[in-house]
Amino acid sequence: MPGSILIDVAYVGSRGVHLNKSGENQWNLEQLTPANIALGTKLQQSVPNPFFGIITTGPEATATIPYYYLLAPFPQFTTVQASFPTGGYSIYHAFQLKVENRLGHGLTTLVSFTGQKLIDDFSQISNVGNQTGGIQNIYDDKQQRSVSSNDQSRRLVISGTYQLPFGRGKSLGRNWNRALDALAGGWQVNGISTYTTGFPISVTAANNCTGCNIQTLRPNNNGSSAALSGPVSQRLNQYFNISVFSQPAAFTFGNVGRTLPDVRNPSSQDLDISVFKMFRPVERLTAEFRAEAYNLLNQVVFGGPGTSINSNTLGVISSQSNTPRQIQFALKLLF
């Protein structure tokens, strides 16, 4: 484009198959089938133990045991966990826009925007810290389909560098002496501003299905959205509408998805600025001075809210996910 401007527009899509559909020890193979869970309180009735005398330790060493032990897929064991079973999938769609003003008069700018949606039936990045959304019913993979816990629907990055036109060889101060150039010439300003939406939220309920071996129980939703509007700082005690959720009845699954479709953790904003100064104290020695400020505006990015409906911290934000402003100085010598 005119003015040395480059515009790059792209669509990116991907489809993943045969992925992990659970992490380590997150797929309980002892979970009862939905038909057996529907037996309700009958699951707690005592019945003769066919393993009596064979199993001599643990809860199955008694003459009678609760009925649910015998209905488990592996009744001779109390716990059977699978790690990283395959069969998961992902679907990704993204619009990407990049606008770049290449170097001209010492100024370079770059604007990058991504609007995306990632759908999967399991997701986990432990070093990010976002919630993964547990598996509720191992017999129904479709029930795990939701917006991914790792989805960031919007991301905008604006960056630039500007070499100030002061100093020897520049438009201003072309013939400065060495002392003046060392003081006022060779300065460069750099900046990067980032905005990202938060990760989706996963809400959980108390697991009140004794013996069902459900890994994670989700709550019920009354059909209303939990999303609330307004500044996050004014919603710290109720970030989302907690009244739309309720504890499922015993021996039933909750109807809420693995992640909420319209409630995310608070978005993140950040501005980093640096100033570089190049000068040559002697002919064969170049020195670079750096002053760098991270989170220059000292903005607060709030952490995620409480997500257990049986906790008094449900919907309450009590943490900060970023660090306060940090300023550092450095000097680098090149010879």
Image (spheres, grey):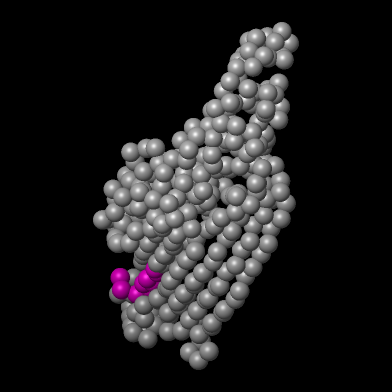
**Residue 293 in sight here:** no
- Classify 152 as above or below 110: above
- Identify which residue is drawn at 57% across, 69% down: 94
- Classify 286 as above or below 307: below
Q: Where is residue 330 in the image (x, y as percent from the top left)?
A: 38, 56
- Identify which residue is drawn at 39% across, 55% down: 226
- Is 288 inside the magenta-drawn segment? no
**Is 128 on the left-hand or right-hand side of 21?**
left
- Identify which residue is drawn at 36% across, 48% down: 242
- Identify which residue is drawn at 41% across, 58% down: 225
Q: Which of 98 and 51 is in front in this view?
A: 51
Q: Where is residue 7 in the image (x, y as percent from the top left)?
A: 54, 82
Q: Which of 56 and 306 is in front in this view?
A: 56
| Residue closest to the far bottom | 2
Q: Position of residue 194 (x, y in %)?
A: 42, 65
How many numbered callouts? 0
**What residue span does the magenta drawing correspond to?**
183-191
Q: Where is residue 116 in the image (x, y as percent from the top left)?
A: 54, 66
The answer to which image quadrant residue 288 occupies is bottom left
The answer to which image quadrant residue 333 occupies is bottom left
**Residue 5 in sight here:** yes
- Classify 55 as above or below 314: above
Q: Nearer the viewer, residue 109 or 319?
A: 319
